[in-house]
Image (tube, coloured by chain):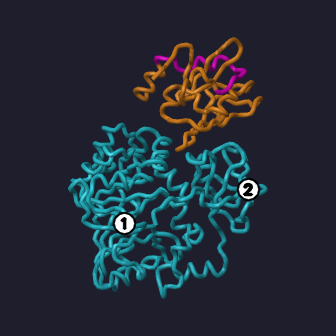
């Protein structure tokens, strides 16, 4: 299980990577592993605005659908269209393959997220 | 605390991902749902279905009793043959669906759903009042394996002297020795493929399981058990049929013999048929991208007309398809409706419920 540095994690198993004024959002290695073979990614529309905790889409295996929750608030600037054609990219590398790129509502929300080591502990112990 | 089958150790050793199902700890998958699904469609897979319930029904009036209790024609069932039937409430709702094995005259074996064992036994016992019949629950002493797929016969034949070619679709044989263990076998299954269901004592089942894996069968979990049965258009209790969904609404009329003199639910089902069914089950294909799931609403012009009972991105067809129970007025071939997925309306078209061609050995 990978918990790379440079990413901030939510307890819903999404990550945020801040690059300049923007942020990329994706799912953790733990999340893709738990879901198994991902066969569909339900992406939001560009320009949609979300608050932290909102459902912004879903990732689905053959067996089940799992909602995606915004770790921080923001407006969708771009969606990763490659995931429509090839949802399995999330299984290949869930950090390289982001889901949405957003303009952050409040950059300070990132500080409330978990550091890699804290997230790893959360995954292992549930605390 | 959930129960474990006699194959629990085998599942763990083979890397089975265990989940809770109907009070049992069972593998949802081993190698992966898609791989296992593919194995059953192209070679052979084995399933631990020891959670299923079994009951012996015998006695002077066992035939009359079962013919009254069940919707299908038990009175026409011959020795060593198997029958699929529904068991209904007086209002036509379904208590359970089951297989009925007739061993000899006045000696039957029923296979019922795990989640319904207690309910079914109570219902059968209540309905048996006035019949000279005995009902014995043998679920806890019976293990069951399903071997399914085009290579099933070839694999099983390696471990038995019994000529499997003699056993036709929905026939059964008792005291068949597999790796020296006595089993009841039938040419039945829940995948739409040729195959066998094997019932044996708990102490024997691990040897048979290991022998079939050694012969090349892929261990399969509950995940692909559901995708396989769904593609074959086979119902699952609690989804396509339930206390609130009659067999006629589910499109299972061929297993309901309304011409029988009497059976539990007959009057209600006959009346419903004569009045015209209010709801029908249809197959559909999504025209937009998405996966239809159990419970999603079906709409036409903003009006709810039904719900999805089961849906998947079909591993065999690579298309998003589903079964939906909808208002009969809209259940027309090539009809279109919308499926509500997380607030989005996805276009869908009605297609035949026979999603794939079944591959039975008749």
Query: What kind of element bears circle 2?
Result: strand
The percent coordinates of residue A66 (x first, y second) are 57, 38
Q: Chain of mark 1?
A: B
Name the residue nearer the viewer: B108 or B78: B78
As drawn, the label of residue B337 is 2
Q: Residues within 10 Å of mark 2 (few under 14, many from 20)?
A: many
Q: Colour of chain A?
A: orange
- Residue extent of the magenta highlight: A99-117
Residue A61 in the figure: left or right of residue B126: right
Q: Colour of chain B?
A: cyan
Name the residue nearer the viewer: B152 or B298: B152
The percent coordinates of residue A14 (x first, y second) are 57, 27
Identified at 42% across, 54% down, the residue is B148
Give the Cα separation between the discs numbered 1 and 2: 44 Å
Residue A54 in the figure: left or right of residue B5: right
Asked if both marks, 1 and 2, belong to the same chain, the answer given is yes
Q: Is residue A118 above or below residue B128?
A: above
Q: Is residue A107 magenta?
A: yes
Q: Is residue B127 magenta?
A: no
The percent coordinates of residue B327 (x first, y second) are 69, 66
Identified at 48% across, 74% down, the residue is B89
Label 1 with label 2: CB-CB less than 8 Å: no
Q: Is residue B249 above or below residue A49?
A: below
Residue B154 seen anywhere in this rendered image of the structure: yes
Can you tell which of label 1 and label 2 is closer to the viewer?
A: 1
Q: Which residue was labeled with disc 1?
A: B167
- Asked where in the image residue B199 lies, by quadrant, the reply is bottom left
Name the residue nearer the viewer: A10 or B196: B196
Q: Is residue B17 above or below residue B201?
A: above
The percent coordinates of residue B37 (x first, y second) are 48, 46
């Amino acid at each position: 299980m990978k918990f790379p540095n440079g990413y901030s994690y939510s307890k819903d198993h999404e990550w945020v990577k801040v690059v300049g004024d923007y942020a990329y959002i994706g799912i953790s290695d733990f999340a893709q592993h738990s879901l198994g073979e991902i066969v569909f990614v339900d992406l939001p529309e560009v320009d949609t605005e979300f608050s932290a905790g909102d459902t912004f889409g879903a990732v689905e295996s053959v067996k089940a659908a799992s909602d995606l929750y915004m770790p921080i608030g923001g407006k969708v600037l771009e969606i990763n269209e490659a995931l429509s054609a090839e949802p399995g990219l999330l299984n290949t590398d869930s950090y390289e393959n982001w889901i949405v790129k957003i303009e952050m509502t409040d950059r300070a929300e990132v500080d409330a997220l978990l550091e890699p080591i804290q997230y790893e502990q959360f995954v292992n112990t549930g605390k | 605390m959930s129960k474990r089958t006699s194959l629990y150790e085998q599942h763990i050793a083979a890397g089975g991902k265990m989940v809770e199902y109907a009070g049992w700890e069972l593998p949802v998958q081993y190698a992966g749902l898609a791989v296992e699904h593919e194995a059953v469609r192209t070679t052979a897979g084995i399933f631990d279905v020891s959670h299923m319930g079994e009951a012996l029904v015998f006695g002077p009036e066992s035939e009359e009793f079962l013919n009254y209790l069940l919707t299908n024609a038990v009175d026409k069932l011959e020795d060593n043959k198997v029958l699929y039937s529904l068991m209904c409430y007086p209002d036509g709702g379904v208590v359970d669906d089951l297989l009925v094995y007739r061993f000899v005259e006045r000696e039957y074996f029923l296979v019922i759903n795990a989640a319904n064992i207690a309910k079914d036994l109570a219902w059968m016992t209540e309905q048996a009042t006035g019949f000279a019949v005995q009902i014995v629950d043998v679920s806890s002493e019976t293990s069951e394996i399903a071997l399914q797929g085009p290579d099933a016969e070839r694999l099983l034949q390696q471990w038995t002297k019994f000529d499997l070619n003699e056993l036709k679709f929905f026939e059964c044989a008792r005291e068949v020795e597999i790796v020296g263990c006595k089993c009841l076998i039938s040419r039945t299954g829940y995948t739409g493929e040729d195959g066998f269901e094997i019932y044996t004592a708990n102490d024997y089942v691990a040897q048979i399981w290991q022998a079939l894996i050694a012969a090349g069968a892929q261990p399969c979990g509950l995940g692909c058990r559901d995708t396989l049965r769904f593609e074959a258009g086979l119902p699952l209790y609690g989804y396509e049929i339930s206390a609130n969904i009659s067999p006629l609404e589910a499109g299972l009329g061929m297993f309901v013999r309304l011409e029988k003199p009497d059976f539990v639910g007959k009057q209600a089902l006959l009346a419903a048929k004569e009045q015209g069914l209010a709801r029908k089950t249809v197959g559909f294909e999504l025209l937009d991208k998405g996966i239809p799931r159990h419970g999603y609403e079906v709409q036409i012009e903003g009006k709810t007309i039904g719900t999805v009972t089961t849906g998947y991105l079909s591993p065999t067809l690579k298309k998003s398809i589903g079964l939906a129970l909808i208002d009969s007025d809209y259940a027309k071939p090539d009809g279109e409706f919308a499926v509500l997925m997380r607030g989005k309306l996805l276009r869908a078209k009605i297609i035949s419920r026979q999603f794939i061609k079944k591959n039975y050995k008749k």
